[in-house]
Image: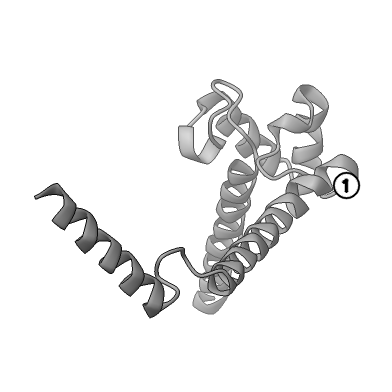
Amino acid sequence: MKRILFTYILMGILWAQEKNELIIDVEQSLMATCCWSGTVYDHGNKEMELNIAAMVGDGKTKAEILDYYTEQYGERVLAVPKAEGFNIFAWIAPIFIFGLGITIIFLYMKSSKDNPKPGSSHQDDAIAYSDEIERELKELD
């Protein structure tokens, strides 16, 4: 009898833990509609938190809950945009910009090695300028 009771208690704890993990996952996936500057999990929008907990208690899945909020507020309520259509640009653009930046830096560094700075390329030029400077200094005296 004790084993059966222990098993039910353990199952109840695991089920509650799964529900809490699902609630946290959904809260981290939705933007807080009060200020649109962070997720529900970060800002603590009580109305949405209670609504999400009620939906999880009713047995709804994460996809169903996200669909419900997407129908109400549009895709801007999602913390991470869906990788479909134009939203793919939001995923690809940072990678493209990073690659372009690295390429530009590499080409700049390569071209600066090929084109030495004026005045520092030859020892003879430095001596010629030094002689000219000495001659002009003597003329000033």
Which of the 4 image quadrants contains residue 115?
bottom right
Residue at the spot x=25%, y=59% of the render?
A: 133
Q: Quadrant of the N terminus?
A: bottom right
Residue furthest to the left = 141
Residue at the spot x=57%, y=64% of the render?
A: 14
Residue 82 appears in view: no
Residue at the spot x=82%, y=50% of the render?
A: 83
Compared to residue 36, the image places residue 112 above or below, namely below
Compared to residue 89, the image places residue 131 above or below, namely below
Of residues 138 and 66, which is closer to you in this image? Answer: 138
Is 140 on the left-hand or right-hand side of 15? left
Colour setup of the view? one colour
Residue furthest to the top = 34
- Amino acid marked by disc 1: Glu
Question: Where's residue 13, x and y in %?
Answer: 53, 62
Question: Where's residue 109, x and y in %?
Answer: 55, 68
Is 85 on the left-hand or right-hand side of 127? right
Of residues 84 and 141, which is closer to you in this image? Answer: 141
* Mark 1 secondary-structure assignment: loop
Question: Where's residue 48, x and y in %?
Answer: 60, 28
Compared to residue 36, the image places residue 40 above or below, namely below
Residue furthest to the right = 85
Compared to residue 71, the image places residue 126 above or below, namely below
Residue 130 appears in view: yes
Judging by the rendered image, the residue that carries numbered circle 1 is 84
Q: How many numbered marks does the figure carry?
A: 1
Neighbor class of circle 1 (other Cα within 10 Å; few <14, some 14-19, many 20+) is few
Question: Where's residue 128, x and y in %?
Answer: 35, 70
Which of the 4 image quadrants contains residue 33?
top right
